[in-house]
Image: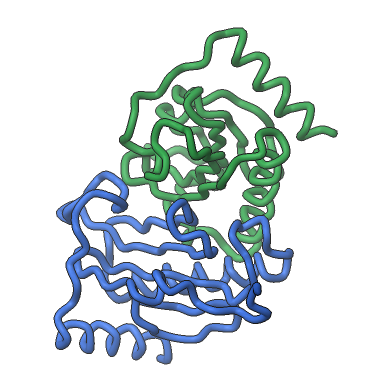
Chain colours: A green, B blue
Amino acid sequence: MKPDHFELDPRLAGDSHPLCRLELCELRLMDDANYPWLILVPRVLAARELIDLDADQRRQLSDETDRAGRLLRDAFRPHKLNVAALGNVVAQLHVHVIARFEDDPAWPAPVWGRVEACAYSAEALVDRIGLLQRLLHA
Amino acid sequence: MKPDHFELDPRLAGDSHPLCRLELCELRLMDDANYPWLILVPRVLAARELIDLDADQRRQLSDETDRAGRLLRDAFRPHKLNVAALGNVVAQLHVHVIARFEDDPAWPAPVWGRVEACAYSAEALVDRIGLLQRLLHA
């Protein structure tokens, strides 16, 4: 049976930590200390592509992607932001928003498939989530 | 002196061919026959990040990205669309919209840095641009 309500993909759930429930999306922190890396997952049943969203959902996602980008800029002052909806491996629609630095382990390549994810220590995770949540609610 | 009007980055110009002038963006076909691959370049002076756009520009870009995605879907029926604003190498803001197939040369990895670009033959380029322009103006 197909689900009749939104459920976060188990792989996305396992690779990331909850930060904030936005109007459309779950905003989560990827568990990879190599890069400050957020994902936005629209709570839209069976959405796989950006073109699966209706115009209102698409505009809301654009607003929330903007908010995530400004959050990373304010928190980390990165050299560049990378924003992407790929989904070749995990089909559930999700948007990556990643702060990039000229000395990060994949620069200037995109981050996917370059170096092993480096999980946060418990203490670093608490610090990072605390910082981001304070800025989100400031 | 900094330019006082929008100019397409010379590297983007060299790597792609014009398809259509949209309200906000130049829509162009990347010269890589490995994947049906479009880029959208907003005609916004000095824009480098999505967060450099104002709300109206951002919404227009979302609409035009949606249009580019639907165009690739209608033309090629891909397995997946990849949409990304990276800009680690070419700073001028541009959005990639790429049709992906399970038998394309980079699948399931992202396309960047995987295999050499494969330029279209003159005939294949004319065919492809013709197909896309017919669908755009249908």
What's the residue at 56%, 36% (across, down)?
A38
Residue B107 versus residue A39 in the image, above or below: below
Q: Is residue B59 left or right of residue B35?
A: right
User: Residue B45, how many percent across, how many down?
Assistant: 64, 73
Percent from the top left, x then y, of residue B83?
43, 57
Toward which corner of the image does residue A131 lie, by quadrant?
Answer: top right
Q: Quadrant of the N terminus of chain B?
A: bottom right
- In this rendered view, identify the residue nearer to me: B11 or A25: B11
Q: What is the x, y in percent for residue A106? A: 39, 36
The answer to whether A13 is drawn above or below residue A98 in the figure is: above
Query: From this viewpoint, which residue is outermost toward the front?
Result: B1
Position of B62 relative to A29 (above/below):
below
Relative to A87, residue A103 above or below = above
Q: Is residue A9 left or right of residue A132?
A: left
* Quarter of the rendering occupied by the C terminus of chain B: bottom left
Count of marks overlaid on the render: 0
- Looking at the picture, how far across and down is residue A14, in whole percent? 45, 22
In terms of image quadrants, where is residue A109?
Answer: top left
Q: Residue at x 24, y 64 (%)?
A: B35
Residue B51, image quadrant: bottom right
Residue located 19% across and 58% down the image = B116
Which residue sits at x=63%, y=77%?
Answer: B3
